[in-house]
Image: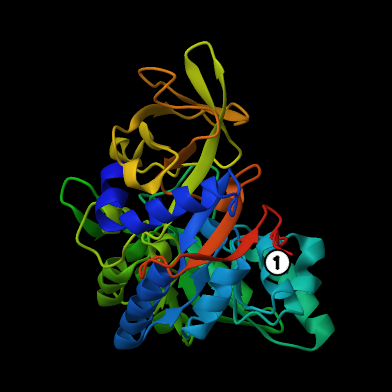
Amino acid sequence: MLEIIEKRNPKLVEASVELHQSGAIPPDCYVVDLDMLRKNVKRIKGSVDELGLNCFVMTKQFNRNPSMISLFIEEGLDKFVAVDYECAYLLNKQRANVSHVGHLVQIPRHRTMDILEMSPEIWTVYGYENAVSISAAAQSSGVNQNVLLKVIGDKDAVYTAQEGGIPLNRALEVAERVASLPNLTIVGVTGFYCTTYDFNKRRVVPTPNMTSIKEAADMFKTKLGLDIKHINAPGNSSIESMRVTSQMGATDTEPGSALWGMCPQQLFGSDVGEPAQVYVSEISHYSEDTAQVIGGGFYPDVASASMTVTQAFVGNSADKIFTDPVKAEIPSQSWIDYYSWLYPESKNRAKSGDTVIYFFRPQVFKTRSANVATLSGIQNGRPQVEAIYDRSSNSMLS
């Protein structure tokens, strides 16, 4: 992984060392290259427009970072999907359009009215019972709510702790019941995850989930006469994957990691998008011969062994940061990541206070305490800290 960032965005690494050593950015901090981010966003927006897709931006990967959300809106990506109800509240607090809710996490019953007041464009339901509570709230408020039905086939792909949805063989029956509820309109279907990156073929391939939701959409149209406007196909969303899903009938895409160039197909394949982030920390102390690195932000989203953290850049100056990467290890998710470990050949190679730079695919909202710093001017050699937000999205700059 380190070779990727060294080759494709070395200026981000160099700027991160200098700014950390000067005290401008703290340890336990994701550093974001806004110039590269904007370049990626422009390309994704261009493909969305070319393919005529609806785009709902996923922000959990960036911990709903206000600087990044502002950039997305500036570039025309102004609709957002809330992965859970906390995400909906945080997006709404930033006055971002909370456009898609209920996927992946269903909205709790007693939060339904709050979310309804945010006027989401679409609301995913996993079954009839969930639809009933939304219908009741919508009826009480005198509004109509558009919903998507999450459908899952027998052979569909499912990540652990993300199970659920309407079985494809019962989808017609459930859809008919949901369609009869007042103040609800079924406008589409969704599933997760609809594409994956095949590391052997080195390309994005559709999962059976994509076939299942298209089959459900066709069934709802022909047998129930529903006006299906959304075939929502999230999962590993990028320029390459949206081309794959749109050819199979998808109408919606939900990019997240692709925006800062961190999808596997961007890192290891030929998809468009450059890496725009690194994780920066510092050596705190030694325990015998092992350097202890300040933690708090270690949650690598590992899709294959090639994405595992095994090394880090270590040093105190930009001109030597790429020399001799140090063997690294990070805590498993069963441990609290107060520290991670470096195994230098000698203590002179890695000293207390040295900058440590990691490169992995993050999910910042899952971390314990990670900060996010956004930088402009990196690519023209004049890096400047634009904002730093803590784990709760509070500004750390006066």
Residue at 46% x, 85% y is 229
- Any part of residue 162 in sight: no
Rate crowding at label 1 as few (under 14), some (14 to 19) or many (20 or more) other CA atoms within 10 Å. some
Q: In which quarter of the image is residue 54?
A: bottom left
Q: Where is residue 19 in the image (x, y as percent from the top left)?
A: 51, 53
The amino acid at mark 1 is Leu
For the residue pair 17 and 177, the one nearer the viewer reads as 17
Indicate how the structure is coloured in the image: rainbow
In the image, 296 versus 317, the foreground residue is 317
Residue 272 visible in this rendered orientation of the protein: yes
Residue 295 in the image, given as x and y percentages of width and height: 58, 35
The residue depicted at 41 percent of the width and 71 percent of the height is 35
Q: How many labels does the image show?
A: 1
Q: Residue 268: where, in percent of width, then height?
A: 23, 51
Q: Mark 1 points at which residue?
A: 90
Q: Quadrant of residue 223?
A: bottom left
Rendered residue at 53%/46% (across/down): 21
